[in-house]
Amino acid sequence: MGAYEEFLARKRIVDPSTGMRIMPDLPGFMKPHQRDIAAWALRRGRAAVFAGTGLGKTLIELVWGGEVARHTGKPVLAFAPLAVSAQHIREASKFGLHAELARTQDDVSGSGVFVTNYQKIDHFDLSAFGGVILDESSILKSTDGHYRTRLVEECARIPFRLAATATPAPNDFMELGNHAEFLGVMSYTDMLATFFTHDGGETQKWRLKGHAENEFWKWMASWAVMLRKPSDLGYENTGYDLPPLVQHQHTVGVEYAPSMETGLLFPMEARSMSERISARRDTIAERVAEAAAITPSDRQFVWWCNLNAESEALTKSIPGAVETRGSDTEEEKERKILDFIEGRTRVLVTKPLVAGFGLNFQFCADTGFVGLNDSFEQLYQAIRRFWRFGQDKPVNVHFIAAETEGAVVANLRRKEADAERMAAAMVAHTASLSSEAVRGLARERPDYDPKQPMIIPSWLEDAA
């Protein structure tokens, strides 16, 4: 292939399937949308699953990995956030699937599914695997991040790749480019050049070209499926009703003396980043006292903090509370989180970056934030540990902020609205395209009924 042909191939708008041509029989215990998505991802070979929390991404990953291992005769490695890998093993055991924990390459033998943490990437030779799975693949968000660069480079020759997350680019299309590059669909820079343009004079901000918008969504739907609920792809929502989410705002007063330095007689709402950081540090005692006072004594609760001083003070203020922090060893973090999951700890105090991604806390329906920052994704992910399909109680979320922190709360509300609009737009643009791709195999059957589960016989070959 000449240089010009290679250039055109890199810029192809629809990424071809490179996976299995003959579909295996998938487990009957999978929900219809789970089975169809797994079959589509196996046919694709390299695919992304952007599915809301509780829709079965873990099960899809495990089934996909097992079939890839059988197909390639090589092991499949699944990366997950810290403490989530053990949860994957429990999920596999619940469904009678086989998966093993692996800390280093020496733990890998045979051709099964092995689960590890992203932090252990240095201990594996990725070229030895027939497939790689990225659980909570929003880790690809940063264009120059350590994990992103390693994964893109070292997985480039692995034939089967699956990325799964509930929150792709909540306010930033660029994360989709990183997913596309990891999957070998198109490079990040080629995506920008093909579909985007600079937004005014700010070179770091991009927006979709008006004439390229439809082509962008078609391109994305050729390698990714997105859904917030089964009906987004034409399936029944039975069993997927979310309970109420009740948000409680607590605002604590601030003692303030007139300042000659600022020239202010009264406390003012923080606006700049430095002002917000200062407001947080100056009100730790007041916010912690409010949090301790409203913590229930008869049920489990998780407090999310932003600063070490917040988590330390809160742990001391609540009898029996256990703090999980970034400086803990991996073993300590896993043990503390497992103690909470199994009911040995009533109140867990931690940060979204430590325990806010991938874990399932449906057994608990009460949580709160004693410290906020400007990351909507961290807020969203932390809340979704509890408010997810499978939760059967109303979820109560408490937000504690000083009166000087109003800008932080308002900023998060704005980001929440922006993210909801963007997610709705992405689903609306890709739903029909993704549904057509995911359910395409079933249309080969003369008795195809879109409301019934798709059963893929072992002899069925997709000629897409």
Image: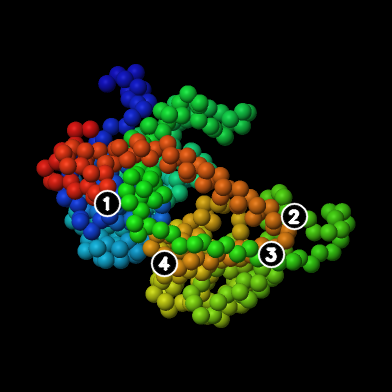
Position in image of residue 139 (x %, y %): 44, 49
Label 1 vs 2, first from the N-terminus = 1
Q: Nearer the viewer, mark 3 or mark 4?
A: 4
Q: Nearer the viewer, mark 2 or mark 4?
A: 4
Q: Which residue is mark 1?
A: 32
Is residue 366 left or right of 97 when viewed as pictured? right
Secondary structure found at label 2: loop
Secondary structure found at label 3: strand
Position in image of residue 289 (x %, y %): 66, 73
**Mark 3 and mark 2: span between their CA atoms?**
12 Å
Callout 4 crowding tier (Cα within 10 Å): few <14, some 14–19, many ≥20: some
For residue 424, above or below residue 186: below
**Mark 1 and mark 4: span between their CA atoms?**
22 Å
Q: Nearer the viewer, mark 3 or mark 2?
A: 3
**Mark 1 and mark 2: span between their CA atoms?**
50 Å
- Labels 3 and 2 touching (C-beta < 8 A): no
How are the colours assigned in the image? rainbow
Tell me if residue 156 can be seen: no
Point 69% across, 52% down: residue? 407
Point 21% across, 38% down: residue? 443
Q: Which residue is mark 3?
A: 251
- Quadrant of the image occupied by residue 112: bottom left
Q: Nearer the viewer, mark 3 or mark 1?
A: 1
For residue 262, above or below residue 396: above
**Mark 3 and mark 1: span between their CA atoms?**
45 Å
Q: Which residue is mark 2?
A: 269
Circle 1: residue type: Pro
Label 3 vs 4, first from the N-terminus = 3
**Mark 3 and mark 4: span between their CA atoms?**
29 Å
Q: Quadrant of the C terminus?
A: top left
Label 3 vs 2, first from the N-terminus = 3
